[in-house]
Image (cartoon, grey):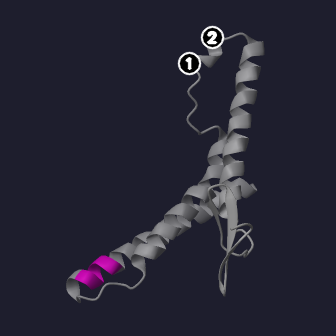
C-alpha cells in the first residue's frame, strides 16, 4: 500500500465518520430539539480535508479531468510550449495564493494622500510634508 493509498483510506474513513456526525445532528435536532454543536464547522472542515486527501491519489492515478481535444491536434513542439505556459500560469496563481495567505508583519498604518505617504501615530497624523 503506497502513501497515496493510505491518504485515500483516511479520506474514506473520515467521510464515513462524518456521516454519523450528520445523522446524530439531524436526530438530535428533530427528536430532542438539541442539535450536535459544531456540526456545520466539522462538516465544512472535513469536506476540505477529504478533498485534499484524495487529490494526491487522483493526480497520481490519472483520474483528473483533462480536456485536450485541441492540444492533441497541435504539433509536439507547440504542445510543449502550451504545457509550459499552463505550468507557469499555475505557478503564478499558486504564488499569488501563498502571497495572499501570509500576514504582513505589523507596521504602522500608512495611507497615501495625493502621492504623499502619511503615518498614523498616537499623537495624531504626521506627514512627510505639510
Q: Which mark is residue 69?
A: 1
33 magenta-colored:
no
Above/below status of 106 relative to 13: below
Residue 8 point in image, percent of width and height: 62, 57
Q: Examine the rendering and report whether any part of residue 107 can be seen.
A: yes
Would you identify the image quadrant in which residue 11 lies? bottom right
Would you identify the image quadrant in which residue 78 lies? top right
Residue 87 point in image, percent of width and height: 72, 35
Would you identify the image quadrant in which residue 110 lies? bottom right
| Of the pair 105 and 86, the residue shown nearer to us | 105
- Distance of mark 2 from mark 1, alpha carbons? 7 Å
Q: Examine the rendering and report whether any part of residue 1 can be seen.
A: no
Above/below status of 46 relative to 123: above
Q: Are marks 2 and 1 in contact (CB under 8 Å)?
A: yes
Specify start and end residues of the magenta stretch as a single range.
25-29
- SS category of the residue bearing label 1: loop
Q: Which mark is residue 90?
A: none
Residue pictured at 71% horizontal, 57% vertical: 99
48 vs 84, left or right, is: left
Residue that carries the numbered disc 2 in the rendered image: 73
Q: The C terminus lies in which quarter of the figure?
A: bottom right
Q: Magenta region's main secondary structure?
A: helix
Residue pictured at 26% horizontal, 82% vertical: 29
- SS category of the residue bearing label 2: helix
Amino acid at each position: 500500500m503506497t502513501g497515496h493509498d493510505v491518504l485515500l483510506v483516511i479520506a474514506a474513513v473520515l467521510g464515513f465518520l462524518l456521516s454519523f456526525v450528520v445523522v446524530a445532528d439531524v436526530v438530535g435536532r428533530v427528536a430532542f430539539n438539541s442539535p450536535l454543536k459544531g456540526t456545520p464547522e466539522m462538516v465544512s472542515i472535513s469536506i476540505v480535508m477529504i478533498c485534499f486527501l484524495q487529490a494526491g491519489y487522483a493526480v497520481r492515478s490519472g483520474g483528473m479531468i483533462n480536456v485536450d481535444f485541441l492540444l492533441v491536434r497541435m504539433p509536439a513542439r507547440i504542445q510543449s510550449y502550451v504545457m509550459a505556459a499552463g505550468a507557469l500560469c499555475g505557478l503564478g496563481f499558486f504564488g499569488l495564493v501563498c502571497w495572499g495567505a501570509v500576514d504582513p508583519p505589523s507596521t504602522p498604518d500608512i495611507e497615501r494622500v495625493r502621492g504623499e505617504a502619511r503615518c498614523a501615530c498616537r499623537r495624531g497624523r504626521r506627514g512627510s510634508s505639510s
